Amino acid sequence: MLEFKRAAIDRRGVWCQGARYGAVLLAIALLHGCAGLPPGADYPKTASSAFAHPEDTRLGQQFASAAHEHGQYSAFRIINAGVDGFQLRMQMIDAAQRALDLQYYIFRGDETGRMLTDGLQRAADRGVRIRVLVDDGDTVAGDEQLLRLLTYPSVEVRIFNPSSYRGHSRFVRRLNFLVNAPRLDYRMHNKLLVADNALALIGGRNIGNQYFQVDPESQFADDDVLTAGPIVGELSATFDEFWNSDLAIPAKALGRTGRPDAGAPTEHEGASREARAQAPKSAAIDYASLLKTGEPLAGIISGRLPLVWAHAQVVYDSPNKKRVAGGALPGRLITRAVLDSIREVQSELLLVTPYFVPAADELQLLKDLRQRQVRVRVLTNSLESTTEITAQSGYEHYRVPLLQDGVELYEVRSMLGNVRGSGQTAKVSRYGNYALHAKIYIFDRRKLFIGSMNYDQRSKRINTEIGLMIQSSELAQLTARRFDAMVAPKECYIVGLISARAPGKSSRLVWRTEKDGRMVESTREPARSGWQRLKVNFLALLPLDREL
């Protein structure tokens, strides 16, 4: 989620750390400034493809008869709760017999990330073939714990468009980015897990405590969709396309990544897996007991947690998205499918996006809908809830014109008044660090998109994205009801306009919400501090929108 360009200009900038880094910058510039392909691009690697016979596995057999009954339809179940997203990943990994493919923008080395890596290690012990493709844009110290899997011959890890600098100095990483910006600004934002080519999980969640909504310091509300049936093979094909691309570099080609031996556990990682499972620090959740229940996967397989069967389409960007967009290569662009679906809306469009920075044509598209009397409602982050202040600074430019066109804007609060629809417990919510991370678009309550694509210019122009376009009134209406719950005044700020009282004066924004049982309003933007307001107002003066 935290795109590399945004990270390069955030509040934690360290531009004054001293001249000792000057030599590093010069060396990087001389060695890598003109590189078109990432380091390790010439390293030998073998092309591979998804496991070809899911029907030979237990997971494949468990869904085979139902899939046969439903023909070309696939099965879907949306996973709203963050902790369910974690458990389902663990259970899919534990259930796999032949193959696991994982593709993520972020794979953290925190409690949940290490537990999932432990699960992958157990799968490798069983002889499961494992392919892990991870982006390099937001790697932090500790994430390299994933590389301990490389001691297994059945495991391969590839890094998408890696930086030449493999350490974790924030300052040096940013210098390297500045020198190689045309290449390093291009990131793989996809999120996908496929087990035995029989079951897939796709959506907006990365791997980490924040994304599973168990970290009191920060919770990202998000959604996954579990799917079985014909669509799984199509998702696997997109993984293969990225896995075999020139930008997917074997981790072994990059050498050491900031610790003496990437294959050996550190003292912390050497602790027993059982002890880590019993007491993660993030929210004192007893994962061991939760995982023993087998839920939610056991309920899905048994039919107690029903699946919805529907037609769906995989929409995604090709690995060389920039060249496709420029006409140099044939390929896929996700925005084509999403924007076409928006154009077809007749009565109502609901957008859920953590970052709302529309390009000119996307802005015009919403205006055209309003001129046709289509109701357009948008749920996004408030300044108070956002973790990406640069994205918020871009969003500020669009609120007034959108409201003037009749678009309804809702900004989620960091402290929820009610946890209904939030995907997390009241215990975690009370810390007041709630932020939106889901990317869901609902078209006339008959069709929905769920995936990794934000309604912003970075998702459109720079990052690769993936998602599902699902033709299901049942799922669309279910998700719309959750939208309605989240835009209630207890959960969000309803943004409005106060008309100018004098000619030549601009309209003013007003934020309305419910607190302590009564409606309150403010013409001062809700924020965590005055300093936060000052920073976002300064960033709004800079021409950053095309990077946000």
Image (spheres, rainbow, N blue to C red):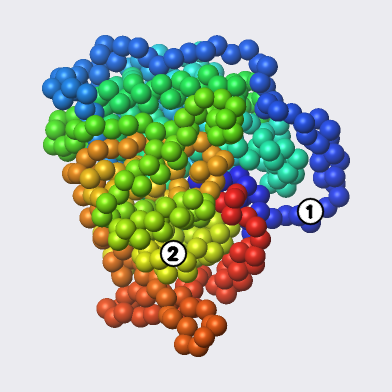
Q: Residue at x 40, y 16 (%)?
A: 50
- In the drawing, does residue 408 fall left or right of residue 250? left
User: First in sequence: mark 1 or mark 2?
Assistant: 1
Residue 314 picture location, percent across and down: 36, 31
- In the drawing, does residue 76 fall left or right of residue 120? left
Q: Which residue is drawn at 56% across and 51% down?
A: 548
Other-residue count near label 1 (Cα within 10 Å), few / some / many at <14 / 14–19 / ≥20: few
Other-residue count near label 2 (Cα within 10 Å), few / some / many at <14 / 14–19 / ≥20: some
- What amino acid type is highlighted by mark number 1? Gln
Q: Is mark 2 on a helix, strand or loop?
A: helix
Residue 138's label in the rendered image is none
Residues at discs 1 and 2 in contact (Cβ within 8 Å): no
Residue 402's label in the rendered image is 2
Q: Quarter of the image holding residue 432? A: bottom left
Instruction: Measure the C-alpha gap from mark 1 to mark 2.
Output: 41 Å
Residue 183 picture location, percent across and down: 67, 35
Q: Residue furthest bottom?
A: 502
Residue 141 picture location, percent across and down: 61, 40
Q: Residue at x 63, y 12 (%)?
A: 44
Tell me the mark number nearer the camera, choosing from 1 and 2.
Answer: 2
Q: In this view, does 489 lie above or below 504?
A: above
Q: Which of 357 and 212 is in front in this view?
A: 357
Q: Quarter of the image holding residue 414? A: bottom left
Q: Which residue is drawn at 58% across and 58% down?
A: 390
- What amino acid type is highlighted by mark number 2? Leu
Q: What element carries label 1?
A: loop
Residue 494 picture location, percent across and down: 36, 70
Q: Which of 502 and 62 is in front in this view?
A: 502
Q: Could one spot residue 239 in this view of the protein?
A: yes
Residue 17's label in the rendered image is 1
